[in-house]
Image (cartoon, rainbow, N blue to C red):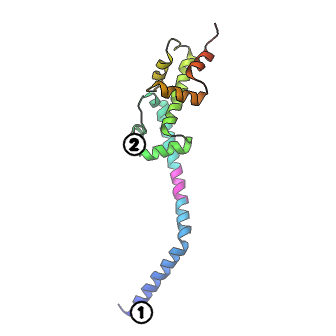
Amino acid sequence: MNWTSLALIIALLWIAFTWVRANKRKLKSKKEKNGSELDEKLLEQIFNRASSALVQEKLYLKKNIRIADLAIHLAQNEKLVSRAINRHTKVNFNTYVNNFRVEHSKELITSGKFDHYTIEAISDESGFSNKVSFYQAFKTNVGISPSEFRAQKQPKK
């Protein structure tokens, strides 16, 4: 290789290097935009599948369900499932699951079929593993305790 060829190669590499440096921000921005659009679509799909599994298969009734269990059920990465739920609901996995459980407990309380159940038994039937978690989630979602809710929903005698 002669000096002229070597000088030409070095010059071309220098031009390419300076062009990349000058356009790095534009290239990065375009890549992030395309990547984030793909990420958003993927996260939406994962969220829809997770919600569907939780509701249709009543996975929220499993006492100790963890995000890892849901991720395995969906054959997805645990972090992606977590991010999808956080992004679409603005709450974490446990809060999201507890919201379904509270709705289920409200249905049990108002149906009349469970009037003979204690609040603890309704908590248990709704997938909560302890009374404290149930009361906290219920009060956060409904604004009153489960006992107060039951008293309001039962017909006056």
Left or right: where 57 falls relative to 149 = left
Near mark 2 (Cα within 10 A), the count class, few <14, some 14-19 or many ≥20, is few
Q: Position of residue 20 (x, y in %)?
A: 51, 74
Disc 1 crowd rating (10 Å Cα; few below 14, some 14-19, many 20+) is few
Kindly identify the amino acid type of the residue bearing the numbered disc 1: Thr
The outermost residue toward the bottom is 3
Q: Identify the residue at image location x=51%, y=14%.
A: 114
Q: Which residue is mark 1?
A: 4
At numbered mark 1, what does the secondary structure look like: helix, strand or loop?
Answer: helix
SS type, badge 2: loop
Residue depicted at x 57% and y 23%:
145
- On the rendered image, what quadrant is the C terminus found in? top right
- Of residue 58 and residue 21, the one placed in the foreground of this image is 21
Q: Which residues are magenta?
A: 33-40
Q: Is residue 19 left or right of residue 76?
A: right
58 relative position to 157: left or right: left
Q: Which residue is mark 2?
A: 75
Residue 103 sits in which quadrant? top right
